[in-house]
């Protein structure tokens, strides 16, 4: 497995900190692999290392509550600074109490947890500011190329646009095996985890809402519009239920929402948002007859890549014209339009029109899958294949 230095270098700064280090993110994005890579690195400077995987039946049968975990660590650690790594720690009763206790004993604590039981709101509440968290995501394209090179296979950009970046899926030799893995993974992440966790009493209604939301990636919607769709096509459902279910998907890192920003009101538009999937496979698994939604998946891919690179994103409205992203980092703003192609006149005019509302002091960027360069004197066009290679928008 490749070394994901992008994440490890951020964690490295806290190796000796008394803050609890939480490695979090959607299931099967590579949290445990990164934890093991950190362990390997720390073992080069210390032999005082303890690792426990609570998905191991033997481990959880013997260490299943806070007292037993604390006793085990105190009995097995050596003198001096100790480093403990607790994988899937949520299986331990009162795990947070154990972690808070251990950090007071010259012990550096690292934990991972499943999105079904250790969610962002929970560790915020349970650990009360005594932690630092690191969000891990599925592969971006440069990581895919690196991993596929290690596996001695190839992955095209089109494959990435359809099937995304869950690391394990690249290890399968057939489309059938890959699709089976992704389908089973989604059932675990979206259906089993959340329905069981929240004791959802109308699972079919929940599945209908999830299907609609995950097909709606890269689109402006609102809780009201989702409610109307569900009421018209399935069964009566309140807007409060929709809001609650969306929060479940967000907390489990399945979707992310960004707000539109309007120049007219100079504020965020409160009731509307754009949804992006953690991985575009969630959209593609819902497509029939290989009619994949490449247009919206491409925008979703650009979103994921920009977030990985550290940009803060909003949708931008100027004079009722939408610009897909205003990306901000280090005090610099970039205005970005994304389209699969602007080859035909209608698409070209649609994507370039909003830019004409901005003065020329703004950095304007168009990202498409076209081979032709559509740059103008005021707009820089970058091909998707080139955008996926760069580390910063400053390179455009």
Image: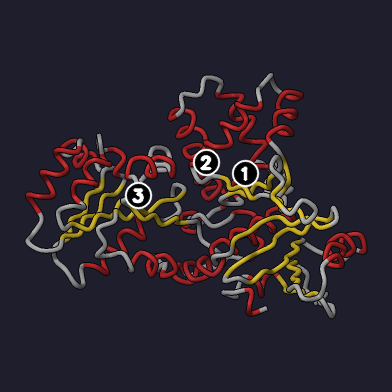
Q: Quadrant of residue 223?
A: top right
Q: Are marks 2 and 3 in contact (CB under 8 Å)?
A: no
- Point 76% across, 61% down: residue: 340
**Quarter of the image where the N terminus is located:** bottom left
Depth check, mark 3 against mark 1: the one in front is 3
Q: Are marks 3 and 1 in contact (CB under 8 Å)?
A: no
If you read the primary sequence from the N terminus, does the residue marked by circle 3 or circle 1 appear first? 3
- Give me the disc on residue 186: 2
Residue 372 visible somewhere in the drawing: no
- Give me the disc on residue 129: 3
Give the structural element (helix, strand or loop) at label 1.
loop
**Mark 1 = which residue?**
285
Q: Is residue 292 left or right of residue 357?
A: left
If you read the primary sequence from the N terminus, does the residue marked by circle 1 or circle 2 appear first? 2
Q: Give residue 70's position: percent from left, percent from top.
A: 14, 44
Front residue of this view, candidates 270 and 302: 270
Q: Give residue 244's position: percent from left, percent from top.
A: 56, 31
Q: Give residue 373's position: percent from left, percent from top.
A: 80, 77
- Point 65% across, 64% down: residue: 327
Q: Give residue 193's position: percent from left, percent from top.
A: 45, 34
């Amino acid at each position: 497995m490749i070394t994901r230095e992008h994440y490890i270098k951020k964690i490295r700064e806290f190796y000796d900190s008394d803050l609890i280090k939480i490695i979090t993110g959607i299931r099967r994005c590579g949290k445990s692999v990164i934890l093991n890579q950190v362990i390997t690195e720390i073992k080069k400077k210390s032999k005082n290392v303890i690792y426990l995987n609570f998905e191991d039946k033997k481990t959880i049968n013997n260490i299943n509550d806070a007292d037993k975990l604390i006793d085990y660590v105190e009995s097995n650690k050596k003198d001096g600074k100790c480093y403990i790594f607790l994988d899937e720690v949520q299986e331990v009763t009162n795990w947070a109490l154990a972690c808070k206790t251990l950090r007071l004993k010259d012990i550096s604590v690292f934990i991972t947890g499943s999105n079904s039981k250790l969610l962002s709101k929970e560790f915020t509440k349970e650990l009360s500011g005594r932690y630092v968290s690191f969000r891990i995501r599925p592969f971006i394209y440069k990581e895919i190329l690196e991993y596929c090179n290690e596996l001695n296979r190839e992955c095209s950009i089109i494959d990435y646009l359809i099937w995304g970046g869950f690391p394990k899926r690249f290890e399968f030799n057939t489309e059938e095996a890959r699709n089976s893995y992704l389908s089973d993974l989604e059932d675990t992440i979206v259906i089993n985890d959340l329905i069981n966790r929240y004791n959802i009493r109308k699972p079919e209604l929940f599945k209908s809402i999830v299907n609609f939301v995950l097909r709606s990636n890269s689109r402006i919607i609102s809780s009201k519009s989702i409610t109307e769709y569900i009421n018209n096509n399935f069964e009566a459902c309140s807007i409060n239920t929709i809001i609650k279910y969306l929060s479940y998907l967000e907390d489990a890192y399945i979707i992310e929402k960004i707000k539109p920003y309007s120049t007219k009101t100079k504020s965020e538009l409160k009731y509307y948002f754009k949804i992006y999937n953690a991985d575009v496979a969630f959209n593609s698994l819902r497509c029939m007859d290989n009619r994949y939604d490449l247009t919206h998946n491409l925008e979703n891919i650009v979103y994921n890549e920009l977030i990985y690179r550290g940009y803060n994103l909003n949708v931008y409205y100027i004079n009722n014209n939408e610009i897909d992203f205003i990306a901000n980092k280090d005090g610099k703003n970039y205005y970005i339009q994304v389209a699969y192609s602007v080859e035909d006149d209608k698409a070209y005019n649609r994507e370039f029109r909003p830019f004409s509302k901005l003065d020329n002091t703004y950095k304007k960027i168009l990202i498409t899958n076209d081979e032709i360069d559509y740059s103008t004197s005021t707009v820089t066009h970058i091909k998707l294949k080139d955008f996926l290679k760069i580390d910063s928008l400053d390179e455009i």
